[in-house]
Image (cartoon, helix red, strand yellow):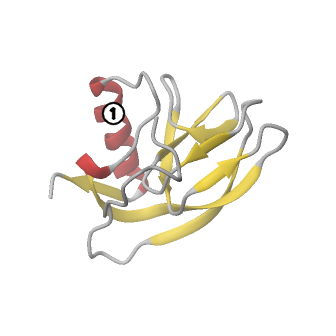
Amino acid sequence: MKTIATHERRTFLKDHPPVMQRMLLHSTGAEQDLIAGTVLGEKDGKCGEFASGAEALGILVEDTTIPADGDVYALVYVHASVITAELTWGTGVTATEQKNALAALRGRGIYASEA
């Protein structure tokens, strides 16, 4: 897994003006470092890194640490144009799940393309 301190900064946004919204990211009970460009989802009423069975919500704007003992607010792109290959996905998310999540994000106003 990439961590905030060790990942290489990559551009995932295209030139279309994005729209952001604050969202509450829920703790999993362990500290979690999420990098900008991480696909977020909601599962069991909790928002966090996209996982199997989640509903895709948006793309994380900035590097964010979710503490083990609490939730944190973060800025999330809810309307944007992004580069698919530069997005970060949760561990174990399959190519089919990514494809379905990208289709769901498109319905929310996030348009992903290869370049």
Residue 21: where, in percent of width, then height? 60, 66
How many C-alpha atoms fall within 10 Å of the one at disc 1: few (<14), some, or many (≥20)? some
Tell me the amino acid under the disc marked 1.
Answer: Gln
Image quadrant for the C terminus? bottom left
Q: Is residue 89 left or right of residue 103?
A: right
Q: Nearer the viewer, residue 6 or 38?
A: 6
Q: Number of numbered discs present? A: 1
The image position of residue 24, as x and y in percent, is: 71, 52
Residue at point 50%, 63% (across, down): 61
- State the image quarter where residue 96 is shown: top left
User: Where does the image place residue 38, in percent across and percent down from the top left?
Assistant: 46, 48
Residue situated furthest front in the rendering: 6
Q: Residue furthest right?
A: 69
Above/below status of 9 relative to 103: below
Question: Residue 8's x, y, as percent?
Answer: 36, 55
Residue at horizontal 27 percent and vertical 26 percent from the top: 95
Q: Which residue is located at x 46 percent, y 34 percent?
A: 1
Would residue 85 appear left or right of 61 to someone viewing this image? left
Furthest residue toward left: 115
- Look at mark 1 in the image and give the residue it sits on: 98
Q: Residue at x 52, y 53 (%)?
A: 5
Q: Considering the numbered disc 1 on the image, is that residue within a helix, a strand or a loop?
A: helix
